[in-house]
Image: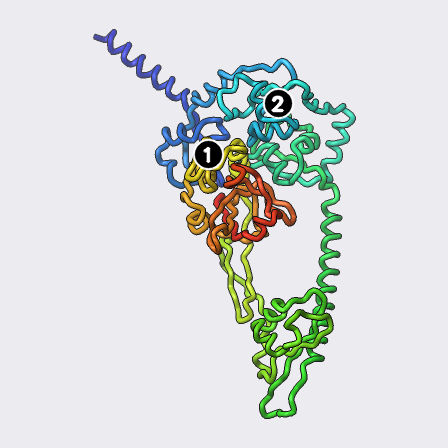
Amino acid sequence: MSFFRFFTLLFLFTSTIVLSQEKIKHVVVSGESVYSIAKKYNVTEAEILEMNPKAKGLLQLEMVLFIPKNSKKKSEEKKIKFTPKGPSHKVEPGESLYTIARKYDTSVEKLRDANPQLESDNLQLGELLALPKGIKKQAEEKLSKAETSKIVKNQSKLQKHVVVSGESFYVIAKKYNISVEELKKANPQVENNKLDIKDVVFIPGTENVEAAEKKQDREEKKKTREEKRKEAEINKTENAVVATTSNDADDTVSLTHEVVPKETKYGISKRYGISITELEKLNPQIANGLEIGQHLIIKAGAKSNEVKSETKVDLPNKDANDVAVVSNETGTETKAEVLPLSADAAMKADFLIAKASENLGVRYRGGGTDRNGFDCSGLMFSTFRNIDLTLPRSSSDMAANSGVKIDRSQAQKGDLIFFATRGRWVGHVGMVTEVLEDEIKFIHSSTSSGVIISSTKEPYYARRFVQINRVLQ
């Protein structure tokens, strides 16, 4: 009996040791999510939630999570041991067959043909892909000791960036709008291109940041003085054309306005708070258009205290994630600023763009949500499901109930963009892929061409733009 008891205790002791070796303890820090933690340990979100049911809600600071050591995801990656014979490419975060094909100026089809080991278009981080014949991979530039020493010496002049959880060379390069190669070259001290939390990296192209900021301050002050001067001149002109009537008891004025270049009836009517019809009624000579230097009657015999002035309204204590609009008598709008995407949200945006781009060329199909065909909302619905975010099934519902409406000037990658293709109502949706100075590019499923990338500079979409919603936080 004692022999049996000894083996039972030995079995329990061994099982406890084995179980303790099969999981890792992780303490949650500020800004982390299940998605970012799964990326960090290269496991799936489902595996984390299976071991930590309480993590399905919001994560709490210093909450202890158990991470599986023997992940199915890791096991699948170990199976991939394909070694290209010729030029190759190592898959980086956010990349897809489409983005890699564009990088080497080839097609997705040729890339698939060169990699028969691929069972699907879903790429694994760090996976090696063979490049099609005739394409030579750009060799990484190896720096001499003298060059490395020179770069390290100049780092004191560069802007510093402290690495936070979930950041990589790819994420940091995107944040500062530079290439990954430039960032790596500026940081030869980083071994094996591996970044850890609290590591310091230096941002190339910021050598003269302080001088540039001083110059910008001087230019802004000069611009402010110029604007004030112009405003004073305009006020002086307006005051000169205000004629006071001889009836002091009525305290009335006749207000006139001199037309300046590029002014329109709409702009003038909005400025003085009257309708275009009223403006034309007081000035019948402008029925066929305005002429520079014309003197227009704005108000005939209006009370002097009725002349409206423009007022800007401050919005204290507003949530920065909301776009608040307040209108005064003149209809002037003030909008609260929108915070930029967090590092975690930026990673998700790049991931979503890569997933949506894998469907480029897929035909349009009403009600479709897979590669057999997508409609516009079906493509968004299917894409955002990749990060376990379920959007409404129609573009109008997405516009009304997904995220928060933001100003067009605040648009960033991963935002939803809406258009009115049914009269005044929202009837089309896409996802922002790139924001330039005066242009927004977006991926969507069009009825004529299927899944494509379009631009707000195209006349059709320029006329029908409605709004942008921020769904990633």
Q: Residue at x 66, y 86 (%)?
A: 244
**First-in-chain label (1 vs 2):** 2
Q: Is residue 13 above or below residue 464?
A: above
Compared across the picture, whether 33 is left or right of 112 comes to left
- Location of the N terminus (image quadrant): top left
Q: Dot 1 corresponds to which residue?
A: 373
- Where's residue 420, x and y in %? 50, 52
Q: CA distance from mark 1 to mark 2?
A: 30 Å
Helix or strand or loop: what does disc 2 sit on? Answer: strand
Label 1 CA crowd tier, 10 Å (few <14, some 14–19, many 20+): many
Residue type at numbered disc 2: His
- Where's residue 123, x and y in %? 52, 25
Q: Residue at x 62, y 48 (%)?
A: 457
Q: Dot 2 corresponds to which residue?
A: 89
Comparing labels 1 and 2, the label whose residue is closer to the camera:
1
- Where's residue 300, x and y in %? 61, 83
Specify the label residue 457 is tagged with: none
Residue type at numbered disc 1: Gly
